[in-house]
Each structure stands twice: as structure tokens, then as C-alpha cells.
Amino acid sequence: MTTRRQLFSDVSVIARVKTGSDHRMVRGTLNLNVKLERCLEDCNEVDDMNDKLVETVHAVGAKFCKTRRRRTQKVSDHTPNLVAVRREMKVHSSTDLTAYRQLNRQISKCMQRDLRNFNTACIEETIERNQGSKVFARDLSARKSQLSKLKTECGSIVSGAPKILSEIERFYGQLYTSSLEPYTSVSNDPRASLIRHYSEDIPDVSLSEIRMALQQLKNGKAPGEDGITRSF
């Protein structure tokens, strides 16, 4: 089978197996050196192996460890602890209800205090960076758009809160102010009159009909949209 004796080791004859002839079964250990075969294969570079390792770690980690958005912490650690205590509270009696209300007031005060401290710290940091008020307003606006400039009716552009508010007030005041004079009589009203098609003219409601309708109302009933009740 081979000319190299070192490839086989522990060679022995199994005499207990009868083959029906003078042949005997032989067992042994075959030692193959596959280093030469591995040398013939294409070697992967270290960068490729590292990229595959990183990709595998990211793929497996994304299933179990989801990324979390980093939010700026505006409140202290004491306030979330109070919220957790309130969540675990159970109201079974008036004493528990009183304690629950007091805890709500305490949480509200802590929230106001923490937000005030956060805004103060942001203002101080903005002043230290020598930045203007627009940068501070942009940071505190929580991604809300603000109107910084406005184009007037004559085409000029105004900036600043007082001028913008004045222009908005003038625009809506002119929009909702009617320049038409009210008509004093129906005869002078140029609008089209009401035409009833395929029906007779409905006469005006008389006082007797109104009095009869009020007398037919039931006591103790809630009033409608007009607010009129039976007791008048």
C-alpha cells in the first residue's frame, strides 16, 4: 500500500475471525499528515477573518442586545425612584389614598425642580461656550420648529419676537375683520331670497304654538343644546 513504514502503526493480526481460507484480517492505525494539504489551500488574510468575526458578533448580538437611544437625562435619580414607589403602591384605604396624593405632589415638585436645574445648567454651559440665545433655544426646543423670520405684506422680512407677533396680529386682525356694512332691513338685502321648490310656504311660528310646546315639556328632564328647561 505504501513504501513508508511510518504511515502505519500498531499493526496486528485478528486470529479470531475465520474467513474460510488462509487469509487473515489485519488491523492497524493509519497516520496521515495533512499539513501539506492545508498548505495547498488558499490562505485567508487576517483582515478577512477579523471582518467575518465582527460580522458574526454583530449578527448574534443584535438578536439579544438591542441598541438603545441615548437620551439626555433631565431629572435626577431620586425622581424615577419615587415614580417606581408610586407604581408599586396599592390603595386600599383612605390612609393609603392620602399617602398616594402626597407622593404625587412630591413627584411634581421634584420634576419641576429637576427641569429648572437642567435648564439653568444648559444656559450656563451655553454662556461659557460664548454662543447666542438661538443655540440655547434650539437645544431646548426638543426638535420643534420655531419661527425666526417672517415676510410681511410689502415684501420686507422681519425678525425678532415682537415684530413677528405684531405682523401676525395685523394679518389675522385684517383677515377676520369684516369691511362690509350690515344691512338694516331685509328689503335692502341684495342676497337671493329663499325659494321653496315643490312645497308650500311655511308660516312663521306663532306665540300660541310656542306656549303650547312649552306646556308639553316634562319636568325633571335634562335640557337640550338650547339650555331651556321646563321650569321657567
Image (cartoon, rainbow, N blue to C red):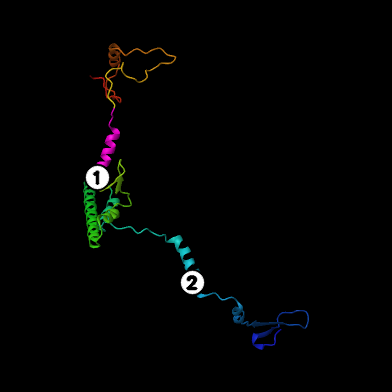
Residue 181 picture location, percent across and down: 27, 24
Image quadrant assignment for residue 186: top left
The magenta region covers 162-179
Task: Out of 9 and 61, give the one closest to the viewer.
Answer: 61
Residue 39 picture location, percent across and down: 59, 80
Q: Which residue is mark 2?
A: 50
Q: Secondary structure at mark 2?
A: helix
**Identity of the amino acid at label 2?**
Asn
Report the disc number at residue 163. 1
Note whether 184 is above or below 138 in the view shown. above
The residue shown at (23%, 50%) is 108
Q: Earlier in the sequence, mark 2 or mark 1?
A: 2
Mark toward the viewer: 2 or 1: 1
Note whether 181 is above or below 51 in the view shown. above
Quadrant of the snapshot with the N terminus: bottom right
Callout 1 crowding tier (Cα within 10 Å): few <14, some 14–19, many ≥20: some
The residue shown at (23%, 45%) is 162
Observer able to see residue 9:
no
